[in-house]
């Protein structure tokens, strides 16, 4: 298969998902949309599309004109039934393209947080193996409510963490793709996020915790991506 990864910033790429795509024998193209107007190929000709995270927010369309283009594209992909997976900002954009009103979360989730599967999530082809719960790396100040007709799959004590839209699209709020290097980069640069400063993120403590937990979480991410690729195939 040919897989397209829509990337929103250089240190928020496909991470361990890229490893899973290559390991499964597929081809991955990356499109750094904010910097490159044209995709590597027609997005509608890919077998599956992945849209990733980023430090911007989904409601900043006046500041980032390319968000409107991505919204339109994701809506078309959902309508066509293209296998689609959005992660963090990407999950918010997928849910938004399906009609959800993305909004600020009542409390930012930055660092490691417990995620619980719903009853529906325990039967979902992507998330079921993670039941009943797991710990996930998070970095977000916005959330997506459940789009009309979508299925809630997982939640934290703060917000919805995953939803399936139709049979072929998933929106996920946590970061199963994040590499150890990218997580370390975000933590080192935490002061660029006013919410991280406001809630008192301790970069030293978070760095130590992440170093200990990221190997197992990276395997969780590779496995989740492999299941998504199986569904797309």
Image (cartoon, rainbow, N blue to C red):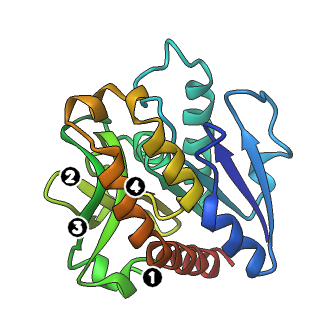
Query: Is tag 1's residue or tag 4's residue first in the polypeptide sequence?
Result: 1
Residue under numbered circle 3: 114
Query: Is tag 3's residue or tag 2's residue first in the polypeptide sequence?
Result: 3
Residue under numbered circle 1: 125
Q: Secondary structure at mark 2?
A: loop
Question: Could you tell me how far apart the alpha carbons at marks 3 and 2 are, in whole angstroms?
Answer: 11 Å
> Does the residue at mark 4 contact the one at mark 3 (Cβ under 8 Å)?
no
Can I make out residue 231 in this image?
yes
Q: Residues within 10 Å of mark 1 (few under 14, many from 20)?
A: few
Residue 121 position in % (x across, y down): 30, 76
Q: Is residue 59 left or right of residue 3?
A: left
In this rendered view, identify the residue nearer to me: 93 or 7: 7
Q: Nearer the viewer, mark 1 or mark 4?
A: 4
In this rendered view, identify the residue nearer to me: 111 or 14: 111
Query: Is tag 4's residue or tag 3's residue first in the polypeptide sequence?
Result: 3
Residue 159: assigned label: 2
Q: Nearer the viewer, mark 1 or mark 2?
A: 2
Question: Could you tell me how far apart the alpha carbons at marks 3 and 1 are, in whole angstroms?
Answer: 20 Å
Residue under numbered circle 4: 207
Which residue is drawn at the image coordinates 30% and 70% (left, top)?
135
Query: Is tag 4's residue or tag 2's residue first in the polypeptide sequence?
Result: 2
Q: Residues within 10 Å of mark 4 (few under 14, many from 20)?
A: some
């Amino acid at each position: 298969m040919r897989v397209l990864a829509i990337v929103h910033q250089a240190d928020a790429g496909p991470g361990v998902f890229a490893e899973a795509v290559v390991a499964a024998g597929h081809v991955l193209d990356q499109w750094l949309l904010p910097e490159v107007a044209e995709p590597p190929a027609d997005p509608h000709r890919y077998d599956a599309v992945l849209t990733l995270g980023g430090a911007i927010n989904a409601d900043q369309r006046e500041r980032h004109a390319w968000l409107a283009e991505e919204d339109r594209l994701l809506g078309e992909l959902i309508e066509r039934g293209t296998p689609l997976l959005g992660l963090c900002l990407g999950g918010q954009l997928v849910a938004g393209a399906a009609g959800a009103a993305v909004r600020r979360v009542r409390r930012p989730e930055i660092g490691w947080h417990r995620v619980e599967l719903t009853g529906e999530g325990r039967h979902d082809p992507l998330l079921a193996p993670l039941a009943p719960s797991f710990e996930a790396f998070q970095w977000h100040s916005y959330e997506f409510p459940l789009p009309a007709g979508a299925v809630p799959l997982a939640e934290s004590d703060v917000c919805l963490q995953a939803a399936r839209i139709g049979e072929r699209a998933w929106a996920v709020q946590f970061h199963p793709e994040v590499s150890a290097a990218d997580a370390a980069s975000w933590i080192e640069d935490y002061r660029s996020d006013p919410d991280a400063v406001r809630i008192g993120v301790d970069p030293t403590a978070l760095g130590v915790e992440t170093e200990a937990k990221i190997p197992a979480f990276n395997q969780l991410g590779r496995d989740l991506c492999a299941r998504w690729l199986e569904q797309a195939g």
